[in-house]
Image: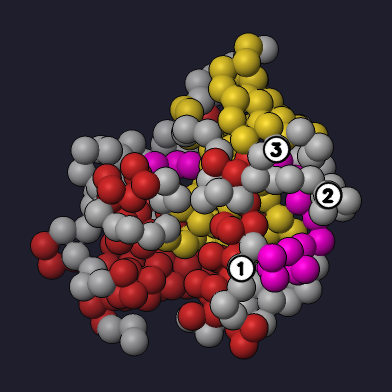
Amino acid sequence: MVSDRHVRIARKIFDANQNRERFQPLRDDDTPESLEAAYHIQDEVHRFLQAETDLGPIGGHKIALTSAAIQELCGVTQPVYGSIFASTIRRSPCVLKLSDFMRLGLEFEVAFEIARDVMADGAPYDTHSIGDYVHSCMPAFELIDDRIADYADLDAASILTDRCWCGGIVLGKPVLDWQDLDLARTPVDLRWNGETVDRAVAGDALGHPLAGLAWVANHLASRGRILRQGEVVMTGSALKTRFAKPGDAVVYSIAGLGEVSLRVEP
């Protein structure tokens, strides 16, 4: 249940974002009493953003804190959820202005577009059952704006209340005939300014991209919500986050799914 305290904390987070203030974890009187309370605060942050900015409706969802290392750093044993506003969904090739972000990080993911509503009464979903709800998949960047956070002082509740730092996403070309790909073992490749700087497999996030999609569907179901037709879900980064500088040109490729690209301007 949302309390006046939750609304007060959400207002503080919203104002800090609008004023481009450095990220501060929630401490003392602002500390959420649980992850569930943090999600109530996140809901209120979304409400303020929709009421007082031009971001518009939510058009997608993301999973965050997928690796054991980052979970340990943030004091949890599970991922966390964030929403993506439709107005922040971009298509490749894309030009980003670094000045639009306080500090821009890139993450490298598989994105799924939902074919039909994923109803709450069908939960729990798993990597097999959730695949029936996928219309297309594609390589994608998540644009992380951590607001110059101090990574020595982080916790999961503070991050998720701040929308998991999602500054938008960039999507590659949708692929409809993805079903025969072994997404757990599909190679991925990151080129930064023409040089290959990292390689892995798409399943390095939670073992399989569909595991991330199922987790999001189950999380929404637990809160009485559904994944809707046409929404996009980001399933966790296969590679470590990298921070962008003016002039950077970045291409992320997934075998069988093509590539997504962006260029960074000041």
Residues drawn in magenta:
128-146
Q: Quadrant of the N terminus?
A: bottom left
Q: What numbered label is drawn on residue 180?
A: 2
Residue beneath the point at 23% across and 69% down: 32
Q: Quadrant of the C terminus?
A: top right
Q: SS of the residue at dot 3?
A: loop
Pointer 3: what residue? 186
Residue beneath the point at 38% across and 60% down: 78
For label 3, count other residues whose C-alpha is less than 10 Å away and answer few (under 14), some (14-19) or many (20+): some
Q: What numbered label is drawn on residue 208?
A: none
Q: Main secondary structure of the magenta part?
A: strand
Depth order, front residue of 27/229: 229
Depth order, front residue of 253/165: 253
In this rendering, is residue 254 above or below 195?
Answer: below
Does 130 lie within the magenta span? yes
Task: Tell me the quarter of the picture where residue 170 sits.
Answer: top right
